[in-house]
Amino acid sequence: MSKKILMADDNATSRGNTEYMLAKAGFSYSSAKDGNEAWKLFQREKFHLLILDQNMPGMTGLEILEGIREGRRHRDVPVIIVSSEIETFDKPPKSIPAECERLGAQFLLRPLIRAE
């Protein structure tokens, strides 16, 4: 069985670029256009890696990550949070890299650049 990746991003261009890179590398993946859709997919299927945009409608990447780590289902799945911001829009703001570290995830700062 091949390993499956869940990627979620509300930006169609970013989502398309990530889908292109995953497909070109031969990965099996599902994609979601917002946080709620990503959460529903995670509840239905088993994924071996999640790549989540931080700022999405519905649920943010960190909210999904917190839900996973607090739950019982696949709580140890590796997660990468991607954002062009380093702080949340919460009051007071939280450091996204620090929250990722606290929750056992990786953080990538945008822009991600595809090598040709």
Image: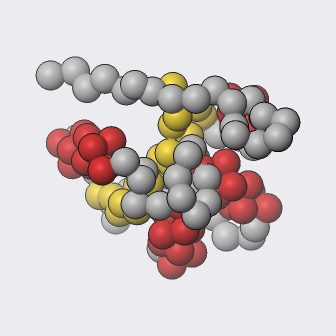
Question: What's the residue at 70%, 40% (across, down)?
Answer: 89
Residue 63: where, in percent of width, then height?
Answer: 69, 55
Question: What's the residue at 79%, 61% (across, down)?
Answer: 70
Residue 114: where, in percent of width, then height?
Answer: 25, 26
87 shown above or below 5? above
Residue 95 in sight here: yes
Quadrant position of residue 5 = bottom left
Identity of the residue furthest to the right in this view:
92
Number of numbered labels in the structure image: 0
Identity of the residue furthest to the bottom in this view:
44
Left or right side of 46 for 2:
left
Identity of the residue furthest to the left in this view:
116
Residue situated in front as seen by the camera: 61 or 50: 61
Looking at the rendered image, the quarter that the C terminus falls into is top left
Residue situated in front as seen by the camera: 26 or 15: 15
Left or right side of 62 for 108:
left
Quadrant position of residue 31 = bottom left
Residue situated in front as seen by the camera: 99 or 93: 93
79 shown above or below 73? above
Residue 26 in sight here: no
Question: What's the residue at 78%, 34% (across, down)?
Answer: 94
Question: What's the residue at 31%, 23% (across, down)?
Answer: 113
